[in-house]
């Protein structure tokens, strides 16, 4: 029977209306919209009202959608959390593969009387799962939560184990699978993982540094995903594992919260993932439950075993790691849904030449997909809300009390990097927290510089908008650029200012700060970042921070440390601090308490001069060097800091460098230690920082 709609224009219109209305309607019903998309597929498909046919477009978009889900899971994973929770995640992966697999085999073999190969295939179906409900986690910003990390690692392990067992069973049934086959299979997997892990990050950094066009960058990343998926299929794995590995290895190349990441998430969640869910719904024939009582009984048994098999590992993991109930619900919700993996396994099991399963098992598996996705959506949504409330309640909203991060633009080539830096260090808890400024001289002939400034601001505004950040802009005309900048800072109550490092006519560091930077530093005590960024921040490999002695006594100590931690978290880059005296203790303590996911190393040097001598041999062009300094007259200032611009021009002319001047309010004596009522030494900077936090909470 022909579907009701066959015209491509009408098909696309119907799909757009479903994508638009289903989330709205089911949100009103307090039901996860994922369920709505699957049910819409049931209604529109040939087993429903036969409005649309599940043609090649649904096959194509559906394949892209499941790859997208796995890719986003790897891309959004925090690599620091991956290292901290890796062992526990591997343990959970073992449990969530073994428990449902063993239960499924026993039930199939002894309760349903399947053959041994068919029982093994059913155990593969129940052991594998798909991160169908991961978009719910991403919407709540819980990608770094331990229970989510456990679930993602568990998904990779369970899927790999199930597909490996599938390959063994199928090869055995086909009469193949000799020792030489398994040697080639194992070598192929090792070569594939090694090649992708080593080559993809290098290729990604090389390409993104040389191409700033937004569309080109997006298409490149999507191409890398499908190259990885193709190579995975070529060596005998499933493409979804290749997409997941691509997300892991490109994790540090695509900064979290940046414009490229926003585009990737937007396109996937708006088009490919919903298309996949609707396509899954089209496969489901609810009518078979009414017409065939045996299938009804088979569905009830398999759904019960599958649900219990995924709930038990989550319970065991919660008890072993002493996690709250919401974490158990989150792990269960993410690992309970069966979709792409289960469908692939049952299709292989029913294809000619294998025929280990009949049509009843195929129909049962499709019903399992529907029920498991509904259960997972409800569980994940409930857990995500509970965890989000708990996280927000404990979140200290760290950062500058002042909302604006002001960036002064001068040259077109610096707009992209400086805007991305401002987006990373801004206070994400305050609306309208970034601002761009362009200043032109009042004697500018024909307003050439003013027009260029307007173009710079427009470009910066587009970059910020691509990252879903609203940037306010201001263009000023003045006879003194530094005065215009400081007046703007006071008018908007900016907490920090980003300036470009002064360059000579050849585009090299001039060896001095420049009149504008010197005047701004002299007339404001706000944090100032004087930057020279040659490549996008996401393509760097490490952040190296040089910290002077007594830096912890400055009132802006925790503020600049928080800003650097945000860069480290969003880019996934490890941080190495070169410190003096006891400063490293304060840095290590702060990162351990507030940013445990940041990969950190602290090296204690014998003197600031020795520290500067060592840096040229330890910092290369793939790293970001941050030199923390101070204004003259303050506690952490030394005469050697006055030569830093010349030092940068001599040793780091082709490097990415930030000269960071921390907040320093009032007289230097204000940042000396005072004593708390309990007798413990507490610095003034700590009291001011706590005062900022209290104001933000209110």
Image: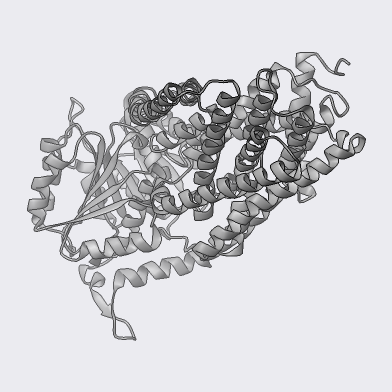
Give the x, y percent position of residue 697: 51, 66
**Residue ID at (69%, 17%):** 56
Q: Quadrant of residue 414?
A: top left
Question: Can residue 271 be seen from the camera position used here?
Answer: no
Question: Can residue 46 be seen from the camera position used here?
Answer: yes
Q: Quadrant of residue 588?
A: bottom left
Horizontally, residue 100 falls left or right of residue 408, namely right
Horizontally, residue 361 falls left or right of residue 250, namely right
Report the residue that reaches farthest toward the right: 291
Camera-nearest residue between 467 and 498? 467
**Residue ID at (79%, 31%):** 360
Give the x, y percent position of residue 421: 37, 42
Q: Quadrant of residue 341?
A: top right
Camera-nearest residue between 428 and 197? 197
Quadrant of the snapshot with the N terminus? top right
Horizontally, residue 493 falls left or right of residue 46, namely left
**Residue ID at (47%, 60%):** 397
Camera-nearest residue between 498 and 355? 355
**Residue ID at (40%, 61%):** 594
Q: How many marks?
A: 0
Give the x, y percent position of residue 92: 52, 51
68 lies above or below 126 = above
Give the x, y percent position of residue 203: 35, 25
């Amino acid at each position: 029977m022909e579907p009701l709609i066959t015209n491509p224009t009408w098909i696309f219109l119907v799909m757009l209306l479903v994508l638009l209305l289903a989330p709205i309607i089911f949100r009103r019903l307090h039901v996860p919209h994922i369920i709505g998309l699957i049910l819409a597929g049931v209604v529109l498909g040939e087993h429903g009202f036969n409005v649309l046919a599940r043609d090649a477009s649904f096959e194509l978009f559906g394949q892209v959608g499941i790859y997208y889900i796995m890719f986003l899971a790897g891309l959004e994973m925090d690599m620091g959390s991956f290292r901290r929770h890796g062992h526990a995640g591997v343990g959970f992966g073992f449990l969530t593969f073994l428990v449902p697999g063993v239960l499924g085999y026993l039930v199939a073999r002894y309760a349903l009387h399947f053959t041994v190969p068919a029982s093994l295939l059913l155990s593969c179906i129940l052991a594998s799962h798909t991160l169908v409900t991961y978009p719910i986690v991403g919407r709540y910003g819980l990608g770094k939560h331990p229970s989510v990390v456990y679930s993602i690692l568990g998904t990779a392990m369970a899927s790999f184990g199930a597909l490996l067992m599938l390959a063994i069973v199928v090869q055995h049934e086909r009469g193949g699978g000799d020792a030489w086959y398994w040697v080639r299979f194992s070598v192929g997997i090792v070569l594939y993982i090694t090649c992708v892990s080593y080559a993809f990050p290098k290729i990604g950094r090389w390409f993104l540094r040389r191409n700033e066009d937004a569309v080109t960058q997006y298409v490149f990343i999507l191409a890398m995903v499908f190259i990885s998926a193709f190579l995975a299929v070529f060596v005998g794995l499933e493409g979804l594992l290749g997409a997941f590995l691509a997300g892991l290895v490109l994790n540090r190349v695509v900064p979290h919260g940046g414009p490229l990441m926003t585009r990737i998430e937007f396109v996937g969640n708006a088009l490919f993932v919903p298309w996949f869910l609707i396509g899954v719904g089209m496969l489901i024939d609810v009518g078979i439950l009414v017409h065939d009582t045996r299938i009804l009984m088979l569905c009830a048994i398999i759904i019960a075993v599958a649900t219990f098999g995924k709930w038990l590992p989550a319970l065991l993991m919660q008890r072993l790691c002493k996690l709250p109930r919401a974490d158990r619900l989150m792990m269960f919700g993410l690992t309970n849904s069966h979709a792409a993996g289960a469908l692939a396994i049952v299709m292989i099991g029913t294809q000619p030449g294998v025929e280990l399963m009949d049509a009843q098992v195929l129909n049962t598996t499709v019903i399992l997909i529907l029920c498991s996705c509904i259960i997972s959506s409800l569980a994940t949504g409930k857990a995500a809300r509970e965890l989000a409330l708990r996280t927000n309640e404990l979140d200290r909203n760290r950062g500058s009390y002042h909302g604006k991060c002001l960036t002064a633009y001068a040259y077109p080539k610096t707009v992209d990097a400086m805007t991305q830096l401002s987006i990373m260090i801004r206070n994400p808890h305050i609306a309208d927290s970034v601002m761009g400024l362009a200043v032109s001289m009042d004697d500018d002939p024909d307003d050439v510089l003013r027009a260029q400034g307007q173009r710079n601001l427009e470009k910066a505004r587009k970059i910020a908008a691509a990252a879903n950040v609203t940037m306010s802009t201001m263009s000023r005309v003045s006879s003194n650029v530094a005065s215009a900048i400081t007046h703007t800072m006071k008018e908007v109550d900016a907490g920090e200012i980003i300036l470009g490092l002064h360059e000579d006519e050849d585009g090299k560091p001039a060896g001095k700060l420049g009149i504008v930077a010197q005047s701004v530093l002299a007339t404001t005590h706000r944090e100032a970042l004087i930057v020279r960024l040659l490549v996008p921040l996401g393509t760097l490999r490490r952040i190296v921070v040089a910290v002077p002695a007594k830096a912890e006594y400055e009132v802006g100590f925790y503020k600049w440390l928080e800003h650097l931690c945000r860069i480290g978290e969003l880019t996934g880059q490890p941080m190495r601090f070169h410190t003096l005296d006891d400063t490293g203790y304060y840095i290590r303590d702060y990162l351990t308490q507030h940013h445990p996911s940041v990969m950190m190393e602290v090296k204690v040097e014998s003197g600031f001069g020795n520290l500067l001598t060592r840096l040229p041999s330890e910092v290369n062009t793939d790293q970001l060097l941050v030199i923390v300094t101070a204004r003259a007259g303050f506690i952490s200032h030394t005469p050697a800091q006055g030569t830093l611009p010349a030092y940068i021009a001599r040793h780091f002319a082709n490097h990415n460098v930030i000269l960071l001047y921390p907040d320093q309010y009032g007289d230097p004596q204000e940042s000396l230690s005072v004593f708390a009522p309990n007798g413990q030494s507490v610095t003034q900077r700590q009291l001011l920082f706590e005062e900022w936090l209290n104001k933000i909470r209110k």
